[in-house]
């Protein structure tokens, strides 16, 4: 028994790591360990022998167990000392630069536009991008065989064979949200409806998916004069013009407005950069007009009692103009570096650019 004691105490003292200690524990005091086997032999001894050997074996077992525990603690201490000696941290080193995300210009411009119209009492309304052709066309006074349906290069949703419901389309403009807003809110009403729209078209200034913002105001005694004021205030705030801006209304045609006008703003392109409010050029920015009585009716509003104006413009287009981005396709299929090139940062927060002059 003394042999066992010496053997294990010296093996434990020499153990190099926790795994070796564990092996020793199993060898010595595990179920089939040497000490345990000896304990089993107690059964064959005479009572006198057992009285002597029993306590001795128990003491041995305790001694080995506490040697194991002590060694384990010593190994852990040594490991910690070693880590403290070899690992260190220079807290004066500069931090590693971290890449941060950026707000997409379309999102940013949408927020800018929203903030400007909010100042004038317009709230934001949204509608589905997949809509029925009734909302996208019929309700807007574009009946089945109207040429505007063909002009808009509409994406039609596939219908299964034998499914004769009227088709769904990817909305070609945000104007269907006019109808949904009138249905939901009734008159009077002041909303803008920003969002994605779709047309089968692709070149430097057209992508199959782009963004528009619709404006709709319905009230009593509303006229083109109100429309003009609202658009002037918007253009001044959006393009950050300190002085005045000049808008030109050109007679036009939309099925959903009567009369209709396309709106240009006076500008110059000197040195290739756009200056709004001065110069001899005109820049077309939107379509507009007085809401057609049939459209008010489709939205559940009595055209004998209420009038309204509406306008629609391309968010991508005004973003390109404001930030000098030459190719629309850059918005949707290029990498992030160009965003930085045009000065967009994650920290840009939309502002009113000096607010509205009233
Ligand atoms: N929906 C028209 C377009 O997509 C724009 C528009 C909106 C014109 C509202 C007049 C009034 O071209």
Image: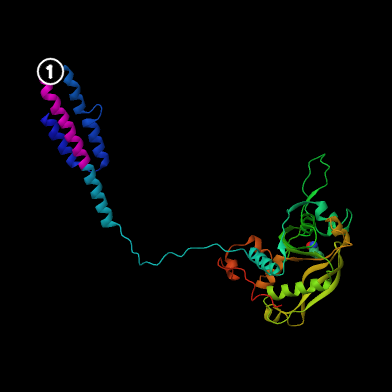
Q: Is residue 181 above or below residue 264?
A: above
Count of residue discs: 1
Image quarter (top left, top right, bottom left or bottom right) of the C terminus: bottom right
SS of the residue under disc 1: helix
Q: Give the residue at x 16% y 21%.
A: 42
The picture quadrant for ligand 1 comes to: bottom right
What's the magenta region?
Answer: 47-70
Q: Determine if residue 208 is in view.
A: no
Q: Is residue 52 above or below residue 158?
A: above
Quadrant of res 331: bottom right
Q: Is residue 294 above or below residue 288?
A: above
Q: Residue 80 location in percent, x, y? A: 26, 51
Please state if 202 lies on the left or on the right of 103 as rendered. right
Q: Is residue 56 magenta?
A: yes
Q: Give the residue at x 86% y 57%.
A: 297
**Toward the viewer: 292 or 250?**
292
Q: Residue 294 location in percent, x, y? A: 88, 59
Q: Residue 28 location in percent, x, y? A: 21, 31
Predominant SS along the magenta part: helix
The residue to which callout 1 is attached is: 47
Image quarter (top left, top right, bottom left or bottom right) of the N terminus: top left
Q: Give the residue at x 84% y 70%.
A: 223
Quadrant of res 149: bottom right
**Toward the viewer: 99 or 338?**
99
Query: Pointer 1: residues within 10 angstroms few (<14), some, or many (20+)?
Result: few
Q: Is residue 16 magenta?
A: no
Q: Determine if residue 237 is in view.
A: yes
């Amino acid at each position: 028994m003394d042999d066992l004691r010496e053997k294990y105490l010296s093996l434990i003292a020499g153990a190099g790591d926790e795994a070796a200690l564990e092996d020793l524990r199993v060898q010595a005091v595990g179920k089939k360990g040497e000490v345990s086997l000896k304990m089993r032999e107690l059964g064959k001894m005479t009572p006198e022998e057992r009285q002597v050997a029993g306590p001795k074996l128990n003491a041995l077992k305790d001694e080995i167990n506490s040697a194991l525990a002590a060694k384990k603690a010593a190994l852990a201490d040594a490991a910690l000392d070693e880590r403290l000696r070899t690992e260190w941290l220079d807290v004066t080193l500069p931090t590693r630069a971290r890449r941060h995300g950026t707000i997409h210009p379309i999102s940013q411009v949408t927020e800018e536009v929203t903030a400007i119209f909010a100042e004038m009492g317009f709230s934001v309304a949204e509608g589905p991008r997949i809509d029925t052709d009734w909302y996208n066309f019929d309700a807007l006074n574009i009946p089945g065989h109207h040429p505007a349906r063909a002009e808009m290069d509409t994406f039609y949703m596939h219908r299964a064979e034998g499914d004769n419901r009227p088709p769904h389309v990817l909305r070609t403009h945000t104007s269907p949200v006019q109808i949904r807003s009138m249905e939901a809110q009734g008159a009077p009403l002041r909303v803008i409806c920003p969002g994605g729209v779709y047309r089968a078209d692709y070149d430097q200034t057209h992508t199959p998916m782009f963004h528009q913002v619709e404006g709709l105001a319905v009230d009593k005694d509303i006229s083109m004069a109100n429309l003009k004021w609202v658009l002037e205030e918007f253009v001044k705030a959006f393009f950050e013009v300190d002085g005045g801006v000049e808008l030109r209304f050109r007679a036009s045609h939309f099925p959903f407005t009567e009369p209709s006008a396309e709106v240009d703003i006076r500008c110059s392109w000197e040195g290739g950069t756009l200056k709004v409010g001065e110069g001899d050029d005109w820049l077309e920015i939107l379509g507009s007009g007085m809401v057609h009585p049939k459209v008010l009716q489709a939205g559940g509003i009595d055209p004998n009692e209420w009038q309204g104006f509406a306008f629609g413009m391309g968010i991508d287009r005004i973003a390109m103009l404001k930030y000098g981005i030459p190719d629309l396709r850059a918005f949707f299929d290029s990498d992030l570096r160009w965003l930085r090139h045009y000065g967009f940062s994650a920290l840009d927060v939309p502002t009113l650019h000096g607010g509205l002059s009233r």
